[in-house]
Amino acid sequence: MTSSTAQARQQAEFELFERLHAEETSDAERSLIRDELVEMHLPLVRHIARRYADRGEPMDDVVQAGSLGLISAVDRFDPSKGVAFTTYAVPTITGAIRRHFRDTTWALKVPRRAQEMRGRIDQAHDALAQDLGRSPTVAEIAERAEVDAQDVLDSMEISHARSTRTLTPQTPDEVPLADRIGDIDAQLGQVEDREATQALLAVLPEREREIVTLRFFDGLSQSQIAERVGVSQMHVSRLLQRSLQRLRGELGE
Amino acid sequence: MPIMIEAPDDAVEVGFPADTANMAIARTVAAAVAARADLTVDQIEDVRLAIDEAAAYLITHASADARVRGRLWVEGPTFHALLSCSTDATSTPEPEAFSWTVLSALVGDIDREIVDADLTMHWALVRDHSVSA
């Protein structure tokens, strides 16, 4: 990319953000601008998602998680702060993808001792994040969970090396993986706090509520939902985006 | 930007053939070093991703049979990565736009230069200021 096209691009982007926040912009126009900004940066999401390609998660899901991060970055970015949008968006996108991986590790197949340890470490991580208002350090997690720092690092490593294993048990006392894959999916947690969101679903119109439930609680793909509800996949995608937007708005209040 | 910094004697060193299949090793080593600097878990994840982007850049421009050499160290609240790989390029190659966007968003300034046919880059990440050492 030459610097002049990069500059032109950045200028165009800046103007879009200005218009997004301008008072005279109508809601309809605002929604178009938001879509345009999101689409402009989808290649960045795909680029980042590819970095997570070897972690045993369907690429579509990773891209979708990243896209949610992107949407939230578009909504929250303040162009007057003087930072480039991408500088602001990258951590939001990677954060959304990491949450996606954290929230879907129930499919992980590891020895029981490691699993218990992982539970303690995850709990300590979440509690500390809440207490401190930031991501905790390895040492802090180790102290809270009463494990070695190395265990914490190992646990982080495990969440990067998930592989698909057979659904049937390999030893008599092993719990079959198939039994541990529940219907309820914590993926909605990647958007906002899950329990609060469940209660909030009531604010959505019937069809949107059904689509959100199918996507995040029943784990159906957008295409599967499209087929079931009888609309196009693009429409499902738009309804999902709009619904999540609305839910986020409710949670933000 | 020329690289002014030198790796200290106690830097951790990791070397591997310039092939993307080996990046996981560098990621793991870097994460362990970053943990020592008391970087937060999120920052350690940033380091992992930054190592991926940086190594991908070096590997893209590596000469045949080249090895990537990474020196990683902690100085006070700062994690440093100095990465290099032999190259046939005669001037510092332009990075791929997305890669660079991601890398600079994660670590800020990235210095890079070619010295004696080695493409070298340096970047650093400072511990979250609210972490008490």
Image (cartoon, helix red, strand yellow):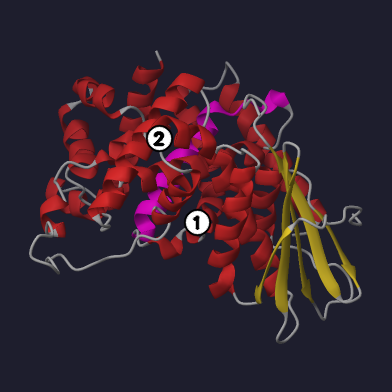
Are discs 1 and 2 both within one chain?
yes
Q: Amino acid at mark 1?
A: Arg
Asked whether residue A137 appears in the rendered view, the answer is no
Residue A163, image x and y in percent? 32, 64
Residue beneath the point at 54% across and 27% down: A76
Question: What residue is disc 1 on?
Answer: A46
Question: What residue is disc 2 on?
Answer: A146
The relative height of residue A87 versus residue A57 in the rendered view (above or below) is above
Taking the magenta stretch, the answer to whether it contains residue A226 is: no
Q: Earlier in the sequence, mark 1 or mark 2?
A: 1
- Are dots 1 and 2 in contact, CB under 8 Å? no
The C terminus of chain A sits in image quarter? top left
Q: Secondary structure at mark 2?
A: loop
Of A164 and A72, the residue lying toward us: A164
Residue stretch in magenta: A58-81
The relative height of residue B19 versus residue A181 in the rendered view (above or below) is below
Residue beneath the point at 40% across and 61% down: A161
Residue B36, image x and y in percent? 62, 44
How far apart are the two marked residues, 1 and 2, measured between alpha carbons? Answer: 38 Å
Of B47 and A97, the residue lying toward us: B47
Q: Circle 2 marks a residue in which chain?
A: A
